[in-house]
Image (tube, rainbow, N blue to C red):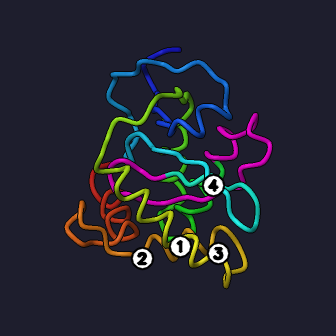
Amino acid sequence: MGDAHVMTLRCTAKLLKRLRLPVHPSSSTPTTKLGDWTAHLLFARHGQIVLCVSERTLLPVLLPGRDIATLIPRFREAVRVMLDAIGVPAEKIQRELDSMAEVAIGKTNSRRVLGSLNDFVRLAESFLGDVTSLLDVSLRLADAPCSPIGMESPRRATLRAFATGE
């Protein structure tokens, strides 16, 4: 794995057990705007769901937990769909996806992100009953104020991250 475009999907123990993939001791700084991501496996009425949260902006992305072998490409696609849905320009989405070309699997390493992930788990469970898609739940979660980012919503923090720089 080269170091040019690498990010780490930091998985909770429950998800690591399901993935059965080698864990990389990644200490490199991610080349993505959204940083590394933390992922957790939920068991909901609708089946298994993977909740992924961006390290830098806490942007949440939900995707089906079935077919765990294809998690990484489906995760990238879910990020693309979410960024498009919140209004990130297509060329910036493509740059982010290019920076996510290589994904290492790692263990969780941030209490701050895990705390937000746990908050999102509780909110997601309450939203899952009355929404039509996982994207709808992700969008609702993205509007929740989060204390680790100054009570801003992940949606606004993400849009600001993509508005700066390149």
First in sequence: mark 1 or mark 4? 4
Q: Which mark is residue 128?
A: 3
Looking at the rendered structure, the kind of residue marked 3 is Leu
Looking at the rendered structure, the kind of residue marked 4 is Ala
**Is residue 70 shown in magenta?**
yes
Q: Quadrant of residue 109?
A: top left
**Is residue 77 shown in magenta?**
no
| Local SS, label 2 | loop
Point out residue 147 in the picture as x, y percentages from the top left corner. 24, 67
First in sequence: mark 2 or mark 4? 4
Looking at the rendered structure, the kind of residue marked 1 is Leu
Q: CA distance from mark 4 to mark 3?
A: 17 Å
Q: CA distance from mark 2 to mark 4?
A: 17 Å
Asked whether the beta carbons under mark 2 and mark 1 sit within 8 Å of each other, the answer is yes
Point out residue 135 in the picture as x, y percentages from the top left corner. 63, 69
First in sequence: mark 2 or mark 3? 3
Position of 45 compared to 31: left or right? Answer: right
Mark 4 lies on residue: 78
Q: Of the residues tagged 4 and 3, which is closer to the observer?
A: 3
Point 71% across, 50% down: residue: 65
| Local SS, label 4 | helix
